[in-house]
Amino acid sequence: MNLHSTSLSFLFAMFTVLASTHITNSNPSFLKYLTHFSLHFFSLSPITATVIAYNSGGHHPQYNRHNNEGKIVTPCEGFSPDFPKDTNTTSYLCVDPNGCCNFTSVQAAVDAVPDFSQNRTIIWINTGVYYEKVTVPRTKTNVTFQGQGFTSTAIAWNDTANSSHGGSFSGSVQVYSTNFVAKNITFMNVAPIPNPGDIGGQAVALRISGDQAAFWGCGFFGAQDTLHDDKGRHYFRDCFIQGSIDFIYGNGKSFYQPKLQLSSARKIKSMNWRFMLEQIYIKENCVLISVANPVHPGSTSITGVITAQGRGSQEENTGFAFTNCIVGGNGRVWLGRAWKPFARVVFAHTSMSDIIAPEGWNDLNDPARDKTIFFGEYNCSGPGANMTMRPPYVIRLSDTQVSPFLNVSFIDGDQWLQPYI
């Protein structure tokens, strides 16, 4: 795990230093090259070679391929989308960067969804990196983005708070509709990593502002403000989330969990290291990876923060609950800071590496918030889970206290969450 997270941090940092807004805006092909490079090394998976083959130079991997009769096979010959079976779905839209489907861009497919549809529309998105800014407006209800794996299908852009007139509008993908679902796809913001304290460098990969949204097997890659969990009830399962400062933030009410139990990761420690990493990060991931600036041994500096929850009053029924997750990466970081006075965040059964500072949390240097924030931990493990240095306002949760945060009832999931199909 240390090898993988270090590789992620180093390569993403190198990538984003090069990917300045000026360079990528003036040279889209350079943005493509850098995104391929980044995604390839993020995943450490051979499957990403398909992404590069699909997009490098605008060529499909089947270009200039000959069949047994010596005839040139075109990219779309024999193309047959593997549409998922979903008995609730009445409409499928297909996106492929080489024109093998109805649409070559994700936004064009979104625009074609009927307004306020009561039936689900699956937008099947083929392997590739889609360089576009995508908005799902509130009128496009019951939409699913179906990728081909989070190391194979990605939507990437490079807006920042400066370039988009506010961090909330910098998202590469912005979702405002209800009942949105994303499966097996990555959301990336490839803007340069800002230094702590930089103004306007926030860069959101995904903003989710609609109610009753679910994300299955998705990746979220960025630095500051990667995932804007803005408002509404949201479910994240088997997701990989990378960032540096406040990289999960907002006033949503969200539940984060893995698919498999962590015990299986321990069983494969003796196996090939690449296979082990793929098992942990692709099949078992509620994984939170910090790419914050590294610190020197003995340093007490803080270089990153995982969560910044925005609950502003006692009446607001919001918060973030993480269970059975893995926290790792670089830097010296807090689990969360009190962005708003009634911030509520819980980590349960979570493995925390030594990147977590001994104090663990921060009240935004406002002691008045100590009486109103709700920062809790329950049965966590690893060197970062040592609670002996935690501030008094951090709660070592009892079985009774943690119970509401351990399953989908926290987000009323029994009322709206559909099974993965």
Image (cartoon, rainbow, N blue to C red):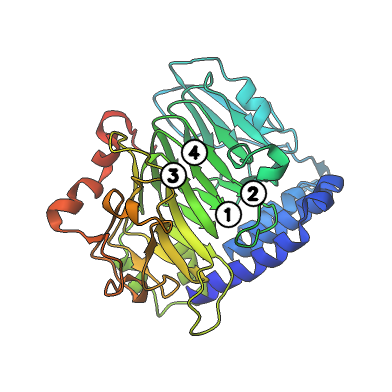
Of the residues shown, which amino acid type is indicated by label 3? Trp
Q: Earlier in the sequence, mark 4 or mark 1?
A: 4
- Tell me the crowding category of disc 2: few under 14, some 14 to 19, or many 20 or more residues within 10 angstroms, Cα based: many
Q: CA distance from mark 4 to mark 1?
A: 22 Å
Q: CA distance from mark 1 to mark 3?
A: 23 Å
Q: Position of residue 215 (x, y in %)?
A: 44, 42
Q: Earlier in the sequence, mark 3 or mark 4?
A: 4
Location of the C terminus by quadrant is top left
Of the residues shown, which amino acid type is indicated by label 4? Ala
- Residue topped by disc 3: 216
Q: CA distance from mark 2 to mark 1?
A: 10 Å
Q: What SS does tag 3 mark?
A: strand
Of the residues shown, which amino acid type is indicated by label 2? Asn
- Residue topped by disc 2: 189
Q: Which mark is residue 182?
A: 4
Residue found at x 65% / y 63%: 12
Q: Position of residue 217 (x, y in %)?
A: 46, 48
**Rendering quarter of residue 271:** bottom left
Question: How many marks overall?
Answer: 4
Q: Position of residue 18 (x, y in %)?
A: 77, 61
State left or right for residue 117 relative to residue 316: right
Q: Earlier in the sequence, mark 1 or mark 3?
A: 3
Q: Nearer the viewer, mark 4 or mark 1?
A: 1
Q: Which mark is residue 224?
A: 1
Q: Are marks 3 and 4 in contact (CB under 8 Å)?
A: yes
Q: CA distance from mark 3 to mark 4?
A: 6 Å
Q: Nearer the viewer, mark 1 or mark 3?
A: 1
Q: CA distance from mark 2 to mark 4?
A: 17 Å
Q: CA distance from mark 3 to mark 2?
A: 19 Å
